[in-house]
Image (tube, rainbow, N blue to C red):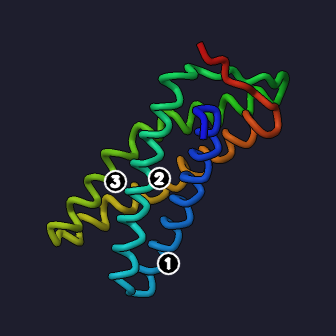
């Protein structure tokens, strides 16, 4: 595996996170608390692995410019901007939700989870969309120094 493979790994980690978040949500709606806890802790672990891989990749590759032009560039940059802003919120929201659950403060946990889940899910899904547009549809390549 080379550093150039990390964007694919990141997309797979984001996909896994999104699936686990969805399963965790369904689990808690069905009152399957143990399954919910497992899915959410696994989603958090996968997201931490993503963050490490993402930082490792961009420390070597830097920024990768989107090669598309016209309307698709505006769409891509809009998705990227919203993804980036919301991605900064995920760690504190997720940590706060996990902390409150671990302390048995479930009313407060639900209050923050109602915000954390959709933001985290949006960031995971748009991360995959960004990967697909940037690397698969438009064939961008990192220039390693």
Q: Residue at x 53, y 47 (%)?
A: 123
Mark 3 or mark 1: which comes first in sequence?
1
Q: Which residue is drawn at 37% across and 73% down?
A: 38
Q: Residue at x 55, y 19 (%)?
A: 62
Rendered position, 109 above or below 71: below
Percent position (x, y) of residue 43? Answer: 43, 61
Q: Do the residues labelled 3 and 2 touch (CB within 8 Å)?
A: yes
- The residue closer to the viewer here, 58 or 108, is 58
The label shown at residue 97 is: none
What whole-number distance in Å separates the C-alpha atoms at marks 3 and 2? 8 Å
**Quarter of the image that includes the C terminus:** top right
Query: Which residue is most to the front?
Result: 1
Q: Label 1: which residue?
A: 26
Q: Quadrant of residue 30?
A: bottom left
Q: Label 2: which residue?
A: 120
**Quarter of the image that includes the N terminus:** top right
Q: Label 3: which residue?
A: 94
Which structural element holds mark 1? helix
Mark 1 or mark 2: which comes first in sequence?
1
Label 1 environment density (alpha carbons within 10 Å; few <14, some 14–19, many ≥20): some
Percent position (x, y) of residue 58? Answer: 52, 26
Q: Residue at x 48, y 65 (%)?
A: 21
What whole-number distance in Å separates the C-alpha atoms at marks 1 and 2? 15 Å
Is residue 110 left or right of 133 when viewed as pictured? left
Which structural element holds mark 3? helix
Mark 3 or mark 2: which comes first in sequence?
3
Is residue 121 left or right of 110 when viewed as pictured? right
What whole-number distance in Å separates the C-alpha atoms at marks 3 and 1? 18 Å
């Amino acid at each position: 595996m080379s550093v150039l493979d990390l964007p694919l790994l990141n997309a797979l980690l984001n996909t896994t996170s999104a699936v686990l978040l969805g399963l965790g949500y369904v689990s808690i709606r069905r009152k399957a608390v143990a399954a919910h806890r497992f899915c959410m802790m696994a989603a958090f672990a996968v997201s931490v692995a993503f963050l490490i891989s993402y930082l490792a990749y961009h420390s070597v590759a830097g920024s990768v410019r989107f090669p598309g032009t016209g309307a698709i560039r505006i769409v891509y940059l809009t998705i990227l901007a919203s993804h980036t802003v919301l991605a900064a919120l995920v760690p504190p929201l997720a940590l706060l939700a996990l902390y409150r659950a671990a302390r048995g403060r479930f009313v407060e946990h639900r209050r923050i989870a109602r915000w954390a889940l959709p933001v985290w899910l949006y960031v995971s899904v748009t991360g995959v969309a960004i990967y697909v547009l940037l690397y698969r549809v438009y064939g961008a390549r990192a220039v390693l120094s």
